[in-house]
Image (tube, grey):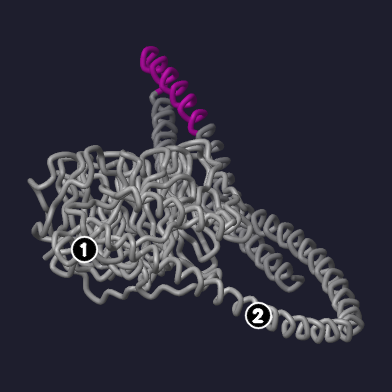
Amino acid sequence: MEIITSNWKSYIFCQLKEHNQQWNGYNDIIEHYNRILENNGILQIQCTKLVTDVNHLRLANAGLEKASEASQQIVNVNDKLTVANEEVVKYLRDNVELSKEVLRLNHSVNDLNAKLITEENKSRQYKNENDELNEKLKKNDLEISDLVQINQIVREEFQAIQTRIHILQVDYNQIKPSCLELEQQLETAKRIHKQVEDELIYYKNQHAAMHDYETEQFNNKIRKNTERQKSFEPTLFFEDDLVIIPPMKQSSDLNQDTLINSNRLNDDYESMYNSYDDSLRRDKKNSMINGGGKFFSSIIDKFKNGMTNSTNDRLYRTSISCFSASIPRHEVAHWDCTELEVYALQFQPSGSILATGCSDKMVHLWEITSTGQQYKYCSLQGSHGAINALDFDNEGCRLLVGSSGDKAYLWSYGDHKILKDTYTGHQGLINTCKLISGRKLATGSGDRTIKIWDLYNRQCIRTLFAGSKCHDLVVTDAAGTIISGHFDKKIRIWDPISDKCLDELQNDSAITSLSYNDEKKQLLACCKDDTLKLIDLRQRKIIYTFSHDNFKVSTDTTKAILSPDGCYACVGSHDGSIFVWNVENKMCESILQRKHTTMVTSVAWQPDGKYVASCEKQRRVILWSD
């Protein structure tokens, strides 16, 4: 720092020294110029005197001529006059030369003044730079002082942490023997628990064998009666957690047996999971000819693709892999799934079941064959409001439903039983719901909150206060990170541990839906300004905006979706059209028109990428393919 200070001081001293030398030259010129001016003044005074003398001589000469006095005097006077005239001419010539010299010196002075002004500007600039350097020097000194203080604080904290680590190490060494002893006790308790568990399984197996025998006897009676029926349409009705399946025709003996068996089952299952074992045929004509089959068994076979009884808390994700999705270009099938409005669609992970949520407070389940034909399985009742959102778990054995009645419902499918759980706590309609893992689910509501629920306790364990109505949400990673889209034009990313908002992505309009592709880490957001935004979550910025002149978002919860391979984006429009964009080349690949008669509320892509399902507000569902 001292070397830098001496350098700039020396530089300024040299500049001032050169400036003084230049001024010395200017001083000599100015002194010479002043002497010339003085001489010029003296000559002008002498010239004035000579002119006065000439005038006097002329007057004298005139007097002499009038008087005609001595001619000799006149000659002398004329000689003096001639000499005076010559001296005047001489002085005038000298005056001209002095004037030229004065002009030359004036030019020299002007040049010197210009150079002086330039040097003064340079000097002023150097002074300003010097002041700036002094300010920077002072600022650097302050920063160095602050850094020294911070360094001292960090050193003290580091020493305190080292002391704390040493204390913890001592405590650990003291606790370690106790921990080893507790681990041994835990191993002993595990062995005892395993023995008790084996005994419990043994007694449960015996109980299950007895129950299976009674169920088989009851099923045989029902099978004999159902074979005599000419038509039957199964519909599942729910009263709290009890499943009731009313047949179209039954004899008095069958009604009595049904009541007896129901009472027996209620006695056997004192917990809240009441079940009603039954064997019915699927709603097909050939089923009636063949004498029917086990209805629940067929549902379980469809829903049990990859199903396990694991209850571990792992991330909900689709297990079906799709290498190349088909671009929907024509209609494969269409049907009316209700007499009212359809709000939600969702494929089961195997792709063989399509669930539709309607304003009639029912969830309708449809089998989708490999050829695209649909057959109705059943209708799930029990909701207190219209169905707004649907979500299957990864194994296809649970169906989560969000309703406008401020409640969420979870139907679980297992061997010979269908259970329904209810989750109550929101103060507004539920717009979206997602299964996070085997133990948790999330719901987003119009009450400006997102709630995390425990599946087994049916209780809300955390509440995220977003401050705006939540229209949709997705789960992105194994930690359970949630991304939500809101009415206030923001996409929020939530920390699964602290329940705080990690980041907010601002948009130009309200968010109606979100769709996430885990492989590409991309998020598709449907916005109320009639656009789709493709967002790279690694950079957390919009990489492209999809739009079309004829595309109009119909509702605040219009659903757009990415294909399973993440190559296409699909959404329905206000006029009933379906738009498909290519995510890679950003081109509109397909526009499906003149099939829907009213606004399209939701679309769903089959997990293997073969079919796309769309639903309109007026009850119609259409299945599309390439």
> On the image, numbered disc 1 is attached to which residue?
368
Magenta stretch bounds: 47-70
Residue in view at x 27 percent, y 74 percent: 322
Q: Is residue 332 magenta?
A: no
**Which residue is drawn at the image coordinates 25% and 61% (left, top)?**
281
Which one is in front in this view, the residue at disc 1 or the one at disc 2? 2
Mark 1: secondary structure? strand
- The amino acid beneath tag 2 is Glu
For residue 194, above or below residue 539:
below
Above/below status of 291 relative to 173:
above
Answer whether residue 495 is visible to the viewer in this image: no
Percent coordinates x, y for residue 137 in the rendering: 71, 61
Residue positioned most to the front: 253
Q: Position of residue 174 (x, y in %)?
A: 92, 82
Residue 49 within the magenta-colored segment of the rendering? yes
Q: Could you say where residue 599 lies in the image, as x and y percent from the top left?
A: 20, 40
Q: The disc labelled 1 sits on which kind of residue?
A: Ile
Which quadrant does the C terminus fall into?
bottom left
Where residue 156 is drawn, which disc sits there? none
> What residue does disc 2 label?
199
Left or right, 11 with reference to 587:
right
Most foreground residue, 222 or 402: 222
Majority secondary structure in the magenta region: helix
Give the residue displayed 44% in from the left and 19% down from the top: 60
Left of 534 or right of it: where is 551? left
